[in-house]
Image (cartoon, rainbow, N blue to C red):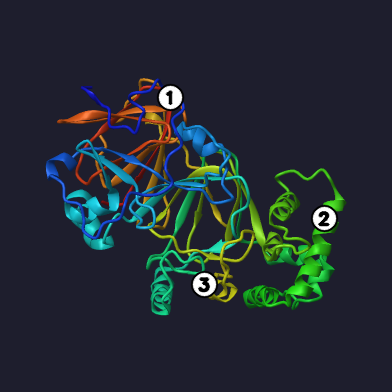
Amino acid sequence: MGKVSSDTAGASDEPHGQAREAPRLESLPRHATPTRMPLGSLQQPMALDAGFQNYAWGDPRFIPDLFRFAATGAPFAEAWFGAHPLLPSTLHVEGGLESLDRVLAAHPRELLGSKVAEGFGGLPFLLKVLAANQPLSIQVHPSREQAELGFERDEASGLALDAPNRNYRDRNHKPELLVALTPFFALAGFRPLEQVRGLLEGVPELSALLPPLDEQVVSLEALTHAYLHLAPASRNSALGTWIDRVRHRSSDYVPGDWEYWALAADDVTRSGDEPDAGLFFFLLLNLVELAPRQGLFLPAGVPHAYLRGAGVEVMATSDNVLRCGLTKKHTDPAELMSIVRFDAVAPRLFDPAPLAAGRQRTFETAASEFQVQTFDFRQGETSAQLASGPEIVLVANREGRLVVSCEGAPSLLREGGQACFVPHGVSYAVEAVQDTTAVRVSVPYV
């Protein structure tokens, strides 16, 4: 197998499983010009370190445990692996550290391949490890055309790219796939109209303020529009009465009940006597439960909210999110209404059957930017030669250990929470030093 590189953010010079120091939360300093490197040093798998987001809804333990650094009690919500300019990953190259987006900008065709570089203008996907301890915002993602128009509007308004009240932070759409690592709960897509009607009948305080719901999609749109434009005092009174009734009706709700999650959301979002406006969406949206290895794909326009759990989230390289409650982040109901798909069918859950070699699973979606595969390797198992690039390979379990080998280059050890970037045209193989769950993200048809 050859020499194993020590280019691993601490794993190589520490006993396996020993806790590391908590990582920094900022990315590398930004520079105006791309970083050019000797091309020969880039034609091999390279260690890739995540940037971290500590949003308030994050789980304080899952990401520290996976990445093997000491938990401090602070929430760790997301670990980003990719080249998004808001938080690009750090690439280990020639014994130094470089921002992935700058290295790709300097060598686009060599590292991405002509088809990806010309077709997408950069690395087209972003991989995240997401760990939610509290509900995320009710949200929806725009189509590519909607994102381009929205970005131009926000640019013309003079809003800074990182302004908290900005809707569009880039020009891209954001189809996304969530593959659960733990039991995972979410709201996703509108319930059948008959279900919504039945639930609303149990909330006369709200239904009296809203138009009747019939069998037309436009009626669901009218219902949502009317709710979002209720006078705050009337809305808060109705929501408060409803939630209090749900709370006193039973003490035996379980995670399979939407009431369980509505009350959990109210516990963390209630501001004095004012309930959060997003609670209404527990009546409108499907409650989805994923087992580990199951996936949920969310195309543009589908309203959703992750509630609790950890998983790998893969999306087009974008951070465009329109929100409508359950967190303190900026909301824009009018813009959200302009991109929600009220005709969306129930969300599709992926439960792909594993293949024999490495118990490989492939998640086929409509996204042209990414393809996701998971592998469950037993200790000592090896893969066949893999080569499609550009791609990112992540070790997604704490005790996992993979050696990534490439002819003519030192082998690279990756442990729990660590990843590597593989450039276009580089063939490589992996061997599991311990039982390992690996996630491989590549570009389809390259």
Q: Sequence-wise, which precedes: disc 1 or disc 3? A: 3
Please indicate, yes or no, whether residue 322 appears anywhere in the rendered image. yes
User: Which residue lies under the disc numbered 3?
Assistant: 339
User: Which disc, if any, is residue 188?
Assistant: none
User: Which residue lies under the disc numbered 1?
Assistant: 435
Marks 1 and 3 in Cβ contact (< 8 Å)? no
User: Which residue lies under the disc numbered 2?
Assistant: 246
Instruction: Determine the image quadrant of residue 368.
Output: bottom left
**Which secondary structure, mark 1?**
loop
Relative vertical location of residue 145 with respect to residue 162 in this rendering, above or below:
below
Q: Residue at x 48, y 42 (%)?
A: 352
In-front residue for pair 322/433 = 322
In-front residue for pair 318/382 = 318
**Which secondary structure, mark 3?**
helix
With 52 as the anchor, is 432 left or right in this view?
Answer: left
CA–CA distance in space, label 2 to label 3: 31 Å
Q: Position of residue 71 (x, y in %)?
A: 54, 35
Q: Position of residue 282 (x, y in %)?
A: 69, 59
With 204 as the anchor, is 278 left or right in this view?
Answer: left
With 422 as the anchor, is 354 left or right in this view?
Answer: right
CA–CA distance in space, label 1 to label 3: 43 Å
**Which secondary structure, mark 2?**
helix
Q: What residue type is disc 2 on?
A: Val
In-front residue for pair 445/101 = 101
Please indicate, yes or no, whether residue 346 appears anywhere in the rendered image. no
